[in-house]
């Protein structure tokens, strides 16, 4: 769902920056300025 919203509706990119077991996952989201 998040991937679709970021990529299709906002023309951005989303990807996993870091994932650590028992700690969590950090995502990076890049959105265009306009």
Image (tube, rainbow, N blue to C red):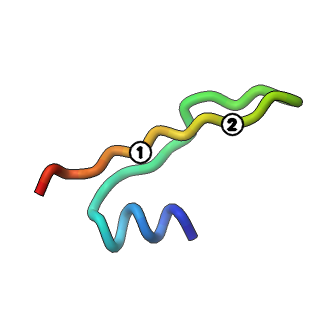
> Please, what secondary structure does the residue beneath circle 1 have?
strand
Query: In the figure, 2 relative to 32: above or below?
Result: below
The residue singled out by tag 2 in the image is 25
State the image quarter where residue 26 is shown. Answer: top right
Mark 2 residue crowding within 10 angstroms, few (<14) / some (14–19) / many (20+): few
Which residue does the image show at 15% across and 50% down from the upper left? 33
Which quarter shows the N terminus?
A: bottom right
Query: In the figure, 17 relative to 9: above or below?
Result: above
Residue 18 at what x, y percent from top left?
A: 62, 28
| Residue farthest along the right direction in this orientation | 22
Residue 12 at what x, y percent from top left?
A: 31, 55
The residue singled out by tag 1 in the image is 29
For the residues bearing labels 1 and 2, Cβ distance under 8 angstroms? no
State the image quarter where residue 11 is shown. Answer: bottom left
Query: In the figure, 21 relative to 28: above or below?
Result: above
Q: Give the left or right position of residue 5, taking residue 34 as reference.
A: right
Which residue does the image show at 41% across and 45% down from the upper left? 29
Count the marks.
2
Distance (Cα) linking label 1 and label 2: 13 Å
Mark 1 residue crowding within 10 angstroms, few (<14) / some (14–19) / many (20+): some
Residue 12: give its label: none
* Residue 13 or residue 33, whichever sits in front: 33
Q: Give the left or right position of residue 31, taking residue 21 as reference.
A: left
Q: Give the left or right position of residue 8, taking residue 16 as reference.
A: left
Q: Give the left or right position of residue 21, taking residue 13 as reference.
A: right
> Please, what secondary structure does the residue beneath circle 2 have?
strand
Query: In the figure, 21 relative to 13: above or below?
Result: above
């Amino acid at each position: 769902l998040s991937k679709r919203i970021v990529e299709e509706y906002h023309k951005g990119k989303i990807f996993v920056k870091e994932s650590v077991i028992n700690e969590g996952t950090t995502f990076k989201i890049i959105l265009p300025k306009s």
